[in-house]
Image (cartoon, rainbow, N blue to C red):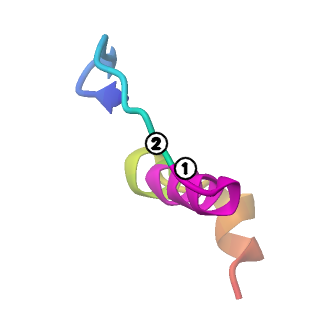
């Protein structure tokens, strides 16, 4: 997981169907890391 100041030692385990886990990782990436310009432009 990402925390203030960089990576923390705590880990998050996601369990579920592959497509659901991939969507959760995508949403966490958007929420925690903020999309770059290309990702913004790719949104419909």
Front position in the image: 16 or 27: 16
How packed is label 1: few (under 14 Cα within 10 Å), some, or many (20 or more)?
few
Q: Is residue 6 left or right of residue 41?
A: left
Front position in the image: 11 or 41: 11
Q: Which residues are magenta?
A: 16-28
Image coords of residue 42 (percent x, y): 76, 74
Q: Quadrant of residue 35?
A: bottom right
The CA distance from mark 2 to mark 1 is 9 Å
Instruction: Name, please, the residue furthest toward the top.
Output: 9
Q: Which mark is residue 14?
A: 2
Q: SS class of the residue under badge 1?
A: helix
Q: Which mark is residue 25?
A: 1
Q: Is residue 11 left or right of residue 38?
A: left
Q: SS class of the residue under badge 2?
A: loop
Asked if residue 18 is positioned above or below residue 20 in the image, the reply reads above
In the picture, the quarter occupied by the C terminus is bottom right
How packed is label 2: few (under 14 Cα within 10 Å), some, or many (20 or more)?
few
Q: Residue at x 45, y 52 (%)?
A: 28
């Amino acid at each position: 997981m990402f925390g203030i100041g960089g990576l923390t030692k705590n880990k998050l385990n996601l369990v579920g169907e592959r497509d659901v886990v991939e969507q959760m990782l995508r949403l966490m990436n958007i929420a925690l890391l903020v999309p770059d310009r290309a990702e913004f432009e790719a949104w419909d």
